[in-house]
Image: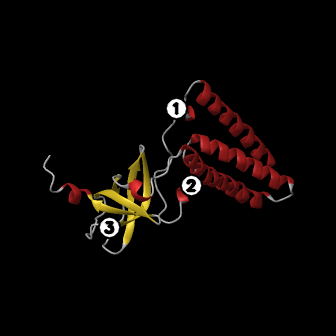
Amino acid sequence: MIYFYLILLVVSAAAFTADMILRYMEKIKNFSLEKRFFKFKGADIPAEKFLPANLTVLLVSLTAASATGILYELAGMRWYLSLPCFVAGGLLVCFVIQYFGENALNAIRGDRLPKGEDAAGLDGYCTEEIEPGDWGKVSLFYREREYEVNAATAGGKTVSRKEKVVSLYESDGFYFVVKSSEIYRDVDI
């Protein structure tokens, strides 16, 4: 089984190196396969972060998983135990890169949603119905990115799923939103 891990390590490391050369020398990302692999999102737990989002993350996770498998084989673990550890190592590396790495990059770049009164005017749509006095989730757009956040209705009316909303302010991690139709109902354009 160690030969399987070695072959996979060499192939994935070579493909990752080629991907980096194409990315930075020729400006071709993911061998021109820039589409994300998965589009689902976990409701409470970011389960999608355990699976590789694109080809580059897949190659990195295969390289790390192969190294994990080799280490377990060299430690004398049987193949039927090292194989699940191989898979778990790859999934864990995917999660670390895509969750913690992405959050760190967003913090460095300043790609975070505004807080407090600076959050006023962000457009979005409701992803979970919000009853008055309760909370749900909305997706807000900021700097060409979409962020799913906890929200409460500020207008005192129920906000249905997929209804357009505008944020008024943020407090303690909750964005207070109102229906777009409520804001613009008396405006003649």
Q: Secondary structure at mark 2?
A: helix
Amino acid at the residue labelled 1: Ser
> Disc 3 designates what residue?
153
The numbered dot on residue 49 is: 2
Residue 75 location in percent, x, y? 86, 56
Q: CA distance from mark 3 to mark 1?
A: 42 Å
Relative height, residue 60 to residue 115 (above, below): above
Amino acid at the residue labelled 3: Thr
Amino acid at the residue labelled 2: Lys
Q: Secondary structure at mark 3?
A: strand
The numbered dot on residue 32 is: 1
* Residue 77 visible in the current orientation: yes
Q: CA distance from mark 2 to mark 3?
A: 29 Å
Q: Is residue 180 left or right of residue 168?
A: left
Residue 56 location in percent, x, y? 60, 40
Relative height, residue 144 to residue 131 (above, below): above
Whichever of callouts 2 and 1 sits on the residue coming sooner in the sequence is 1
Q: Secondary structure at mark 1?
A: helix
Whichever of callouts 3 and 1 sits on the residue coming sooner in the sequence is 1
Q: Of tags 2 and 3, which is closer to the observer?
A: 3
Crowd around label 2: few <14 · some 14–19 · many ≥20 (10 Å): many
Q: Is residue 114 left or right of residue 85?
A: left
Residue 33 location in percent, x, y? 51, 36
Crowd around label 1: few <14 · some 14–19 · many ≥20 (10 Å): few
Occupied quadrant, residue 9: top right
Whichever of callouts 2 and 3 sits on the residue coming sooner in the sequence is 2
Residue 140 location in percent, x, y? 39, 54
Name the residue located 76 percent from the left edge and 48 percent from the top edge: 67
